Image: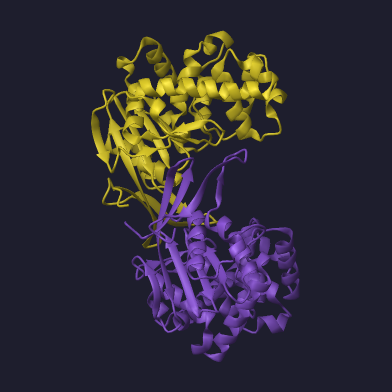
Chain colours: A purple, B yellow
């Protein structure tokens, strides 16, 4: 492949494994600020686009209607760890909209509940129908997907209805998006001045929630949680399955998207750290640990590290 | 990197991720039968070399001395799942050599117990010293490592004392081995006619145990367990961390080794399946499922597959 974004995994004196990928840094008007590799390649954003998917939820008025706050918006953008506060907040949220946990669980384990729940809550008005039958729930998924394509089109600056798609972990479509366009969508959320007022308000609210409730975005010790906590107003990041990571940089008016072609989440985090460092926003006190995370064996012994390759920001 | 071994992961109509690696098929005399990529590159074999490490255990006479069988030899070659029969067999084994589970557990979880246990048992004679103190156990690890370097040298046909090493998951060294040499070591075990009688008997016994007790090699549904069960006398395979897979093909007198450079275990299995199919030994009834394993989402829906790329045995 020969993709320029390279993350190495060492063990002792050796580079044991290496991950390759592509990355784009884009401005809200679509201008490419920096690029490594074929950024016109279409990738599946997976959960990294949850902040974009949350736009429809925030714009629906469900926040005001049900008295929700940053923690709920952050959860709508999240791939959370299912920790107590996540689950408690989900339960209380469900009660606010007039549903009970039993109505949704359907024998599913927690992550599935969360995915289903988020999708139901994103639609606001049709939550009651979904509560009563499975077909309603599926209609909800589909209507969210339609809204999501409209938001994607607005944020990417092109017609997302033409994007092919795959099926994501929770059953909804994940649109095949050129990496460059995904980075532009992030830039549009970072600096929403070119968007409609409705979109701009939702984007600003979502960014604020991601920084205000970083724990809700993932969980204890998670890379995304740490970055969102450390950089309020400076960076909001979200990863997705199969090596995707996205970021909004409101201070710089930039959006970032990257994809490790081998799908490695561990590498996507180091690559995002390298990009944040390259762009001058990585906190000095976290730099070494985040740029060179340790590799430990079963008993906790330090046996290697992960790092950007010398050939790419290393 | 542009490594020729390519495994694709699809989702819907798209190739979402791809894994690249190298592979070698070698004869016992070191002749390369087939090669894809830089097979002189040194890789860390990790657990894929457990069958080689087991040579010292089998040659020590511990089998006869303690009345052990195929299931114990298979466990010595294993990265097992910690299922009931694995644990029960380990406990009974420990009792046979005069140790109790509590003597070794030291607060470690099961995989660590297993690793420690295997290393103790491999040395046979020093088991009692290790049972009494940690420094004895460490001496045991080191003496196993020394024996292992000797066996590696004999099987690879070159001086393994010169190999640099990293620290493996259980604390013992993992030698940086040229992929070609690792494949040759597998070939030497597949057709041990060039080895000393002592080595040849141990290699034959180890291969027989891997086929006779495939469950002990990993566990329910594991790729290695399925291959070793399906192909007695035809193929014995073992994977290792970070995308390594090795195989002995006694019928063909060949050894196989492969390394996915990104460290992906999921890809190393499909690559081994593709090589076995290429060499004509993959059972027809398992071919489709093993060559194209399904990718399912959280609720079990088929969303894609893994497969060798068209450019490499696909």
Residue A39 in sight from this viewpoint = yes
Q: Is residue B151 left or right of residue B140?
A: left
- The residue closer to the viewer here, A222 or A48, is A222
Q: Residue at x 33, y 22 (%)?
A: B188
Location of residue A186 with respect to A226 vertically, above or below: below
Q: Is residue B130 above or below residue A74?
A: above
> Image check: A42 left or right of B220?
left
The number of callouts visible is 0
Query: What is the x, y in percent for residue A134?
Result: 60, 67
Give the x, y percent position of residue A155. Answer: 47, 81
Q: Residue furthest bottom?
A: A197
**Residue A56, percent from left and from top:** 57, 80
Q: Which residue sits at x=69%, y=72%? A: A71
The answer to whether residue A146 is above or below residue B73 is below
Q: Residue at x 70, y 65 (%)?
A: A103
Which residue is at a point 45% across and 53% down the rendered structure image? B295
Q: Give the left or right position of residue B69, taking residue B20 as reference.
A: right
- Residue A282 place in picture, x, y as percent: 56, 67
Relative to A222, does residue A155 appear above or below in the rendering? below
Q: Nearer the viewer, residue B170 or A167?
A: B170
Can residue B54 be seen here? The reply is no
């Amino acid at each position: 492949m020969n993709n320029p974004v390279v993350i190495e995994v060492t063990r002792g004196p050796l580079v044991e494994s290496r991950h390759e990928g592509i990355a784009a840094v884009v401005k809200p008007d679509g201008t490419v600020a920096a690029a490594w590799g074929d950024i016109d390649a279409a990738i599946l954003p997976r959960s990294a686009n949850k902040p974009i998917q949350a736009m429809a939820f925030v714009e629906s008025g469900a926040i005001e209607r049900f008295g929700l706050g940053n923690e709920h918006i952050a959860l709508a953008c999240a791939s959370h760890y299912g920790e107590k506060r996540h689950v408690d907040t989900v339960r209380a949220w469900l009660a606010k909209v007039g549903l009970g946990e039993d109505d949704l669980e359907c024998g599913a384990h927690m992550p599935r509940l969360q995915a289903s729940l988020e999708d139901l809550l994103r639609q606001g008005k049709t939550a009651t129908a979904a509560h009563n039958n499975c077909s309603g729930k599926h209609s909800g998924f589909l209507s969210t997907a339609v809204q999501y394509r409209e938001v994607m089109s607005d944020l990417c600056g092109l017609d997302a209805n033409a994007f092919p798609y795959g099926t994501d972990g929770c059953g909804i479509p994940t649109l095949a998006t050129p990496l460059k366009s995904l980075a532009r969508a992030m830039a549009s959320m970072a600096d929403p001045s070119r968007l409609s007022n409705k979109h701009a308000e939702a984007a600003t609210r979502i960014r604020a929630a991601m920084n205000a409730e970083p724990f809700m975005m993932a969980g204890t010790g998670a890379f995304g949680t740490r970055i969102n906590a450390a950089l309020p107003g400076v960076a909001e990041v979200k990863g997705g399955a199969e090596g995707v990571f996205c970021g909004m940089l409101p201070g710089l008016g930039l959006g970032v998207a990257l994809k490790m072609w081998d799908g490695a989440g561990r590498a996507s985090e180091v690559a995002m750290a390298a990009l944040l460092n390259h762009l001058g926003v990585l906190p000095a006190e976290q730099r070494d640990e985040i740029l060179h995370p340790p590799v430990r064996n079963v008993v906790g012994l330090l046996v290697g590290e992960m790092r950007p390759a010398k050939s790419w920001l290393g």
